[in-house]
Amino acid sequence: MTNRLADATSPYLLQHRDNPVHWQEWGPDAFAEARERNVPILLSVGYAACHWCHVMAHESFEDETVAAALNERFVSVKVDREERPDIDAAYMSAVTATTGHGGWPMTVFLTPEGEPFFCGTYFPRDHFLQVLAALDEAWRTRETEVRASGTHIATTLAGALAPPTPYAVDSSALSAAVALLARQFDTAAGGFGGAPKFPPSMVLEFLVRHHARTGDPDALSMASRTFRAMARSGMYDQLAGGFARYAVDAQWVVPHFEKMLYDNALLLRAYASWWKVTRDPLAEKVVRETAEFIVRDLGTEAGGFASSLDADAGGVEGLTYAWTPVQLREVLGDDAAAAADLFVVTASGTFEHGSSTLQLPVDAADPEWFDDIRTRLLEARSRRPQPGRDDKVVTSWNGLAIAALAGAGSTFGVPAWVEAARACAGHVLGVHLVDGELRRASRLGAVGAARAVADDHGNLAEGLLVLHQSTGELRWLDAARAVLDGAAGFAADDGGFHDTAEGAESLYLRPRSAADNAEPAGQSALAGALVMLGGVTGDPHALDAGVRATAAGLGLAVREPRFGGWSLAVAEAIVAGPLQVAVVGDDPRADALEQVARRSPSPGLVVVRGEPDQPGAPLLADRPLVDGGAAAYVCRGMVCDLPVTEPAALEDRLRPPSEGGREGRSGAIDPADEPPGSQN
């Protein structure tokens, strides 16, 4: 036997193609070999940007002693969690259930039938060798007992997947979630919980939507404090834009340096929503820089977006990004001391080995000086070792990027971002749709064999619907409908969705998650897309399906709102909408009407612009010009007002019922200056 990863499409698997371990990809051949040899399977799951995956690879999988033990006594299978999220979800449930925590690298030992019997994450080399020896001895001497343990774990976990009772989608549930978040909020540093601290992108989107609908000052306070803290932290790239995956400390000082497409797409969308409510210049700055980071650093030649940038460069975590005072002086000369003060680069360092991450607690007094400093530091940084890039194009995450770029581009009037979203959509639809079936990922134009999962369908469909609204092009609406039609096989009896389709590869359990973690769960992604489709088309069946899917997952979101951000954000859109705006006409007044509509923060808003009575566009049907000129038609819950022709009148129509929401947008009152629960 030999290592069989050389032909893999996953950059993560290709990182292991030269290991002395006889790795192979997940598939029937691996299980057939395990049954024939009657040995356990080592399932090792990770991803290309994972720092500790690299550490375990260097310590163990490149080690001849470890490789010899694995090759003799086990069948070793490598899985890229980004390429096969179904496998990752199924076995991560076993890891968390048996160890109390999860993470990557994920290390699970299976029976030849695929049932997990021993679970863990990162193991140092010597400990890993001890584990291998103990499991080998247990399998050879107590195989029946080991198999029974695996069957017990599999049966128990499968039984625990019974769906929760659907929860009513109403305003009281959403207010209760905000109140619970307020009790969990870090009033000192923003965000929720302690170290490590992850950017709560979907929770922030929910809080902004809730404030836009209700005027709740506590919701906006929590969101604004967190948005500002993250934007000024070491987790945000103060030189080139874009966010790292998380901070290792509770104050957002030191990031885990990997940059993920899904994080940056979700945060781009959330900061744009925050700007719509507050018009905060910091929000606009982050939107512009993050959008440019996605297009510039994650864009592929074919038009899609790469998955991530590595945490490491030259084998050292953070090498590209951290600075010492001496390094600043080498680049900036006499400006170094002022730059060190501005970026909090200290003599002792805020990171490792006397180096510091760059923070920006306050803006520079001289913007021109600051731009010059950033340019010089970026040019010097470009000569350092650069992080590796996982150029795998994941359907789901590209859908998030399409939505974020198209929405931000139309809000801020940047056609290049909309065009990047359009190119991405064309690439994904052209490569990832194979004989009408959506696939999960591709690389360098070669599509992988893995079928799309629920979040691929939901996030791509929503991205296409946002792109349709941004461009008026009907092909994106048609494509979104087709993608959602393809998700019919994921449906569950309670109106929710499984993560995998009926007829997909059978695992020891069929995963179904209602929790929104680093990205929307498949169920909430599909719910959001269906709700948006209902708004864009007026289709009551789509809207009803979205409501039922949201209700199926809302119980968890209300109990644990930190892990239900997207479900709650979709619920806000349901309670507030649908609010439909159709703008017809092709003159400067139509442009002004469109700008007012696109900058409204209403959670349930959909906006379509086009020619009067445009064929195939439901919101434009029976929408004539008014006195030969542009007009905007506003409908709430499928009930329409008379058309308006002046931007001020449209702004008044779109104003939320709460005056609190009005104050937040105008900047007259900024609830972010007070902690949750205070009197503003």
Image: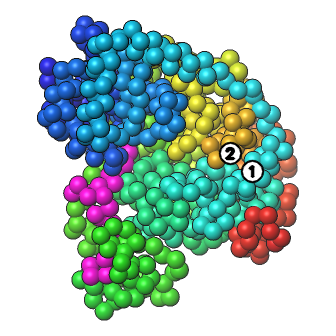
* Mark 1, residue position: 180
Q: Nearer the viewer, residue 436 or 459?
A: 459
- Residue range highlighted in magenta: 306-327
The image quarter in which residue 33 lies: top left
Q: Residue at x 61, y 22 (%)?
A: 160
Rendering coords of residue 597 (x, y %): 70, 56
Q: Amino acid at mark 1?
A: Leu
Rendering coords of residue 657 (x, y %): 86, 57
Q: Specify the farthest residue to the bottom.
A: 334
Compared to residue 390, the image places residue 164 above or below, namely: above
Left or right of residue 433: residue 10: left
Q: How is the image coloured?
A: rainbow
Callout 1: SS: helix
The image quarter in which residue 678 lies: bottom right
> Is the N terminus in the top left, top right, bottom left or bottom right quadrant?
top left
Q: Is residue 375 visible?
A: no
Image disc number at residue 561: 2
Rendering coords of residue 176 (x, y %): 80, 47
Q: Amino acid at mark 2?
A: Pro
Q: Residue at x 33, y 72 (%)?
A: 355
Cα–Cα gap, marks 1 and 2 = 7 Å
User: Are the residues tagged 1 and 2 within 8 Å (C-beta)?
Assistant: yes
Rendering coords of residue 675 (x, y %): 73, 68
318 is within the stretch colored magenta: yes
Q: Nearer the viewer, residue 222 or 487?
A: 222
Left or right of residue 623: residue 475: left
Q: Residue at x 25, y 40 (%)?
A: 125
> Is the C terminus in the top left, top right, bottom left or bottom right quadrant?
bottom right
